[in-house]
Image (cartoon, rainbow, N blue to C red):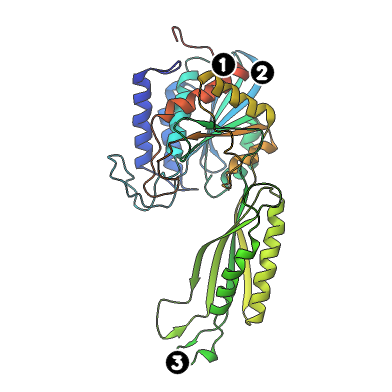
Amino acid sequence: MTPYFGDAEIAHLRTWRHKLHQFPEISGEEAGTAREVVSFLADTQPDQVVTGLGGHGVALVYNGAEPGPTVLLRCELDALQIHEISALPYRSRIDGKAHMCGHDGHMASMGAVARYIGQQRPDRGRAVLLFQPAEETAHGAEAVLADPKFAEITPDYAFAIHNMPGLPLAAVAVAPGQITCASMGLRIELTGKTAHASMPETGISPATAVARIIDAIKTFQAGDVITQGFRRVALTNVQMGKPVFGITPGSAEIRMTLRTPESDAIHALLEDVLKMAREVAEREGLVFDHSTHNFFRACINDPEAAAAFDEAATRMGLARVDDYVPIRGAEDFGLFGSCSKSALLFIGSGVERPMVHNPDYDFPDELIPVGAELFLGVLDQFLGVPRKSGA
């Protein structure tokens, strides 16, 4: 039993989380999940329902009795292209797709908030509950903010929670300032000419260039602590030629992820990597091309918004992990800082739990009410959220 939710309500939300887990949809394909959100929360009678927001996004708006600020709470709709290997009774029914980042749990916590404020409207202002699409590709937040429908619900404050394995269960990490790094995907394409395997000298193979570029990646690593000057380049995929024995390769593709603390600094790192790769390609007589993908801006917590999360955690008596942030990971929630005072909080999902994006990860159901209460604690500070009678 919690100050906001009874055991029956928590069990209902847990069952819903398990349903969401069984039917995952990846970034840009979340139409069914969006419909499920609208259907499940219809009886909370939101004052406004915005659908098709930035793709398949859904925003539920609950008005307070008096004028006041607009506070947006955000969770994510999308799953990942990962094959789940668990034996859970509610494991993914969609082969090759699974909620391996806990977005099903984040939605369940947000659903709990909706079910509560549907009965206990805020005293003032507006609560906007955003179920955002395409977080995993970094396109979701940008598409939501660019959607003309978002202008109607632009918030004064925005808050998000992300579960984090490796932290003690229900312990929180939040602070003002730098929280996550900026990240960008880089695809390099090298084109030469195939040849018969008995006469490789008649072709132009990208093999040597690929090896040199991979070896050079280590020269772009700088720093272990996330401060100014920190850089990371991580190789993520290499494809070269065809899986045959009689033909030498005529093309190759290299994918990597670039990472810096600041959103602007990542462009300087990009130029440095491209300069190196172009020079290698030219020496080997290869045609060079590239493209960038999945640009996550750095997440910088506003001091006032971070303090609100901190106050909510204090009221709940949650343990703190003070030396955890900033982290190397990226989150597209950082873009909401461009239109509001925003803050992202990490909540521990257990020290021994598999890491997010692992094929055996599962969101701990115990966190559903904890995440919801953190959100409600923030809403209470800005909008006033009455407790249920007897709570």
- Judge left or right: residue 295 versus residue 265: left
At numbered mark 2, what does the secondary structure look like: helix, strand or loop?
strand
User: In 3D space, how far apart are the residues under numbered discs 2 and 3 (Cα atoms)?
Assistant: 76 Å
Q: Residue type at mark 2?
A: Gly
Give the vertical position of 294 relative to 327 (above or below).
Answer: below
Q: Residue type at mark 1?
A: Pro
Q: Nearer the viewer, residue 15 or 162?
A: 162
Q: Residue type at mark 3?
A: Ser
Residue 130 point in image, percent of width and height: 54, 33
N-term-proximal mark, 2 vs 3: 2
Residue 150 point in image, percent of width and height: 62, 35
User: In 3D space, how far apart are the residues under numbered discs 3 and 1 (Cα atoms)?
Assistant: 76 Å
Q: Are marks 3 and 1 in contact (CB under 8 Å)?
A: no
N-term-proximal mark, 3 vs 1: 1
Q: Which mark is residue 68?
A: 2
Q: Are marks 2 and 3 in contact (CB under 8 Å)?
A: no
Which residue is drawn at the image coordinates 63% and 77% (left, top)?
287
Residue 372 point in image, percent of width and height: 48, 25
N-term-proximal mark, 1 vs 2: 2
Give the residue number, with chain letter if any, for mark 3.
198
Pair 2/3: label in front: 3
Q: Looking at the image, can residue 62 be seen?
A: no
Could you classify mark 1 by the number of other residues whose Cα lies within 10 Å: few (under 14), some (14-19), or many (20 or more)?
A: many
Q: Are marks 1 and 2 in contact (CB under 8 Å)?
A: yes
Q: Which mark is residue 204?
A: none
Give the residue number, with chain letter if any, for mark 1.
122
User: In 3D space, how far apart are the residues under numbered discs 1 and 2 (Cα atoms)?
Assistant: 10 Å
